[in-house]
Image (tube, rainbow, N blue to C red):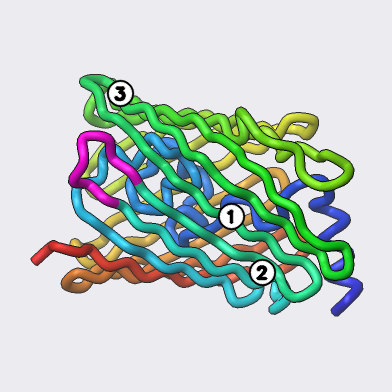
Amino acid sequence: MRLKILIVFFLFQGLSLSQEIIGARAFALKSYVAVANDPWTIFYNPAGISSLRTREVAFSYIPAQFELAELSQKGIAYYEPLLPVKFGLGARIFGFELYREFILKLAFAREFKFFSIGGSLSYNLISIKNYGGDGGLGFDLGLISNPVKFLRFGFVLRNVISERIGKAKEKLPSVLEIGLAFVPYENLTVSSSVEKVFALRESFKYGVEYIVEKWLCLRIGLLNFPTRFSAGIGIKYFIFNLDYSIDKHQILGLTHQITIALRLGEK
């Protein structure tokens, strides 16, 4: 067990291990930067919250990332639609007693005629047992454009501004992601994107979401670096959304995630 944890840390050294994987729908689709239309977009592309119309609160839980209970993750997201500038709050916690990450995000967005622009301010805290902890601020910038009804463009630059953390003064990794979402039918979305973590090679992401019935949808996703396959299901009932996803990492194994969301104020 300890050997596997060490392998995980080695493969992801220099990056936040948890990365932006919170929210079972986004986790299943992989390519989400242009889809970005539920509360978890706070973490993926803050511009996406401008298209939301209903107040929502959502909770997500990963019991064991890569089948390791030590790498569990919990998250919460809240969206408020009743102000001219839309805003959302999100938080997530990752890790165990030896290593822990905490991220708090405040996202805001404004919708214009042909596009939406948004930003998110984050506080990132990393704590390592016997070494203490340190935190710093980061800022993400995102854009969503819907030039035609069936096509949606998404762009985000994560940690475009960030403070240095710890005695080594390490900066949070800057990440650029650009994607498209194609909606040929009302019940079908096909998305693709490219993500570039500076100093590392780019990753290509693909996702498909198919709405079988108003209450049921199916999802699949693919990431090429590292190679990961994912699938998920979404169920709507009354004011509740329940999403489940599973991910298979080429080397590290399986990860399960479950999310529940409540649409507040909706009858």
257, above or below 105, in the image: below
Q: Amino acid at mark 2?
A: Gln
How far is the residue under mark 1 from the one under mark 3? 28 Å
Indicate which disc residue 115 carries.
3
Q: Please tell me which residue is depicted at 47% across the width and 39% down the height of the picture.
A: 120
- Sequence-wise, the earlier of marks 1 and 2 is 2
Q: Amino acid at mark 3?
A: Phe
- Sequence-wise, the earlier of marks 1 and 3 is 1
Give the mark toward the camera: 1 or 2: 1
Residue that numbered label 2 is attached to: 65
Q: Please tell me which residue is depicted at 24% across the width and 68% down the height of the picture.
A: 236
Give the mark toward the camera: 1 or 3: 1
Q: Please tell me which residue is depicted at 75% across the width and 53% down the height of the picture.
A: 134
Near mark 3 (Cα within 10 A), the count class, few <14, some 14-19 or many ≥20, is some
**Which region is colored magenta?**
80-87
Indicate which disc residue 103 carries.
1
